[in-house]
Amino acid sequence: MNSEMDGLGFGRFLWVLIWLAASAVAHAAGPVETNVFAVQGVAVDETDKDAVSARNKALVSVQVKALGMLASKLASPEVAAEIAKMEEKDVVRLLRSLSIEEESTAPGRFIGKFTVRFQPAAMRRLFGKYGVSVIEDQAQPSLVLPVWKSPEGPQLWEDNPWKKAWIGLNAQQAIVPLIVPLGDLEDTEIITAQDVLNQDAVKIEALRRRYDVKTVLIATAAPSPEGGVRATMSGDSQLGRIVFDKTYQAEDGAIDASAALAAERFHGVMTEKYKQIRSKQIAAARAEKEAQTSRALPVAVPFSSPSEWNAIRARILSAPGVLGVDVSTLGGNGAVIQLIFTGPVESMRVSLQRTGLNFGQVGGTWVIQPM
């Protein structure tokens, strides 16, 4: 297979992928599937001998760019730098589908914006090679209502730095998905910027129902007298109560850049919080599964008389987590048993200790004996 990918072989392979991608783009319709291995808003600008050739080039370069963006989001800078070194022929094998959000052409030029989706199984293997375990379960989507407090009054649907910042996040398919309303006629008839600031529950609920989300977050921002923007966010979510209130100033001090920085930081904090919650949930589920899994361990049980053996055996069977005791050998001063129990060994040790028995290793052999 590798030899077929070399030279002209890879060229034919690449054109087949371009043709398939073009076909997928041409027939893309309906709701967009969301997953953590998808990247929205990937912009490309390619030139070639004609517009068709430029478009074909863009269908490949957008995948390379999207993979780099995804690696930067899900992995460390070091891992992202390694993934960025991948060759085109290896990147295009990871594609699941792509669709065009925007496009324009000119003689010998193609400009477009894409949503690129990668194959989950292939991406798991790729990130796994670098020791990166990706949390794929997404949080419940939240609807963000960005209100810009301008000198002319509050703005929700107009073009402004704050709305632009949230749209620019392209966070609909992030680990913590955030949806910015379309701002179409129906949206504008449902609610105004002042309604949002007044926290009009009826109108906010109507918009929530339209976008079929469980959480609505209100985000406000205004130019700060000291420079940058003062930004806030509030609302109840799957992550708990969200309350942000901070001033952000980009390095260049520009309002647009400061607004983008604020939105990015807010989303970053929410993402880290969700990762912590999911990590704890995954660990708890793993511990519960381990606790429900039975295991058998060979254990030596020394005793001085049959009556002591019967007493020790009764204590073992009374310990929480013990499922059974199978006797392998039985002598005048001791027995070797198969101790059948659930949960980790440490939990079993504590459980037996509560019955007055020590459970530990002596010279590499597990031993149970009275305390």
Image: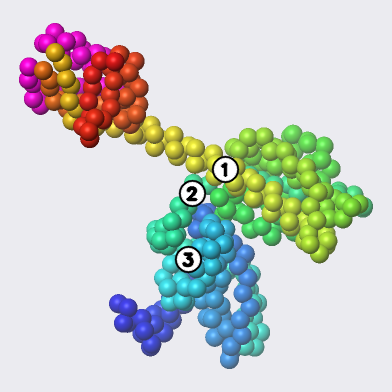
Q: Position of residue 126 (x, y in %)?
A: 42, 62
Q: Image check: 302 left or right of 213?
A: left
* Magenta stretch bounds: 305-332
**Crowd band around label 1 with a 10 angstrom C-alpha radius: few (<14), some (14–19), many (20+):** many
Which circle's residue, 2 or 1, is located before the other in the chain? 2
Q: Which residue is mark 3?
A: 97
Res 148 visible: no
Q: Judge whether 347 appears above or below 156 on screen.
A: above
Q: Secondary structure at mark 1?
A: helix
Magenta stretch: residue 322 in it? yes
Q: Are marks 2 and 1 in contact (CB under 8 Å)?
A: yes
Q: Residue furthest front?
A: 363
Q: Which residue is mark 1?
A: 274
Q: Which mark is residue 135?
A: 2
Which quarter of the figure is the C terminus placed in? top left
**Crowd band around label 3 with a 10 angstrom C-alpha radius: few (<14), some (14–19), many (20+):** some
**Crowd band around label 2 with a 10 angstrom C-alpha radius: few (<14), some (14–19), many (20+):** some
Badge 2 amino acid: Ile
In space, the residues marked 3 and 2 are separated at their CA atoms by 21 Å
Image point (67%, 34%), residue name: 241
Q: Are marks 3 and 1 in contact (CB under 8 Å)?
A: no
Q: Residue furthest bottom?
A: 49
Badge 3 amino acid: Ser
Eye-nearest disc, 3 or 2: 2
Which circle's residue, 3 or 2, is located before the other in the chain? 3
In space, the residues marked 2 and 1 are separated at their CA atoms by 10 Å
In space, the residues marked 3 and 1 are separated at their CA atoms by 27 Å
